[in-house]
Amino acid sequence: MNKYIVFSDVDGTLIDSKARILPSTLYSINELNKKGIPFCIVSGRSPNALFPLLKEYNIKCPLICYGGALILDSNNNILYSKTISKEKARKIIDFINESNFDLTYNIFSFFDWLVPFIDKRVKHEEDLVKSFALIGTIDNVNNNGIHKILLMCNKEKTDEILLALKSKFKDFNIEKSSNFLIEINELDVDKGRAIKEYCKLNNIELDNTIAFGDNYNDVRMLETVKYGFILANAPLSLKEREFILTNSNDENGIYNGLKSLHIID
């Protein structure tokens, strides 16, 4: 059997609707490890929002964070980093503030999570990822730049905000990652490019790549790999695309996908 590598999104994919890793998913990761098949997390989350999950389930693996802007090896050493300059990021923040959008913005840089204030949206995210935001603005970011701006929106306004941002800012990668979240990265940052970068760094052929995802920010990842699995809990428009459909994140989606390729039993 060729030596594959398996990439997985986190929210809506690796974890179920109760933010747990299913026993079948954990079994799958352990079986991959026994077979010497690397498993790599690919998430819009920050490293600090992934560490508690990895610790809870005793998982050690490489991490592609911030939708592809930061890559860490399994020992948390930085392999790759692509940031937005403070000057560019300030233009988006100023536009958001001037437009009075119904949202809360979050700034992420390496291991730092900054918000202008703590509201119920931020508190909900803190509870979900078991990590904590710091009060601060773009002026508190060091000169290394910003990996991601995350917008927590009124879900009734998300598409409207997304359209406004995409219309005004052509030099950013702006994607909706849920019905209330918008992620903003540097233009040439996405999960697909990050997978190519990771495979290049580790001499892995793209023909041996597998990925699991469930939302719009996973599309380029699923298009990049040889076997792109979309989970059944994904939006209908994504399930209608030419990805491989597997079960939902509550119904052993990752396990059944890998089993269908005869990679695990």
Image (spheres, rainbow, N blue to C red):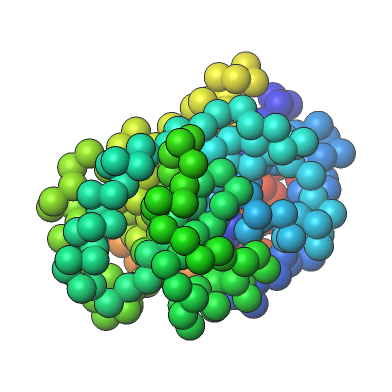
Pinpoint residue 181: horizontal percent, then vertical percent.
39, 66
User: Residue 207 vs residue 241: left or right?
Assistant: right
Pinpoint residue 120: horizontal percent, then vertical percent.
48, 83
Pinpoint residue 105: horizontal percent, then vertical percent.
38, 64
Q: Quadrant of residue 96?
A: bottom left
User: Residue 103 vs residue 169: left or right?
Assistant: right
Q: Residue furthest top?
A: 203
Q: Is residue 5 above or below residue 16?
A: above
Q: Is residue 96 above or below residue 74?
A: below
Q: Quadrant of residue 83?
A: top left
The answer to whether any part of residue 193 appears in the image is: yes
Residue at 13% across, 51% down:
168
Pinpoint residue 26: horizontal percent, then vertical percent.
78, 57
Residue at 66% across, 47% down:
258
User: Residue 255 vs residue 120: left or right?
Assistant: right
Residue at 34% across, 33% down:
188
Q: Is residue 205 above or below residue 9?
A: above
User: Residue 167 vs residue 82: left or right?
Assistant: left
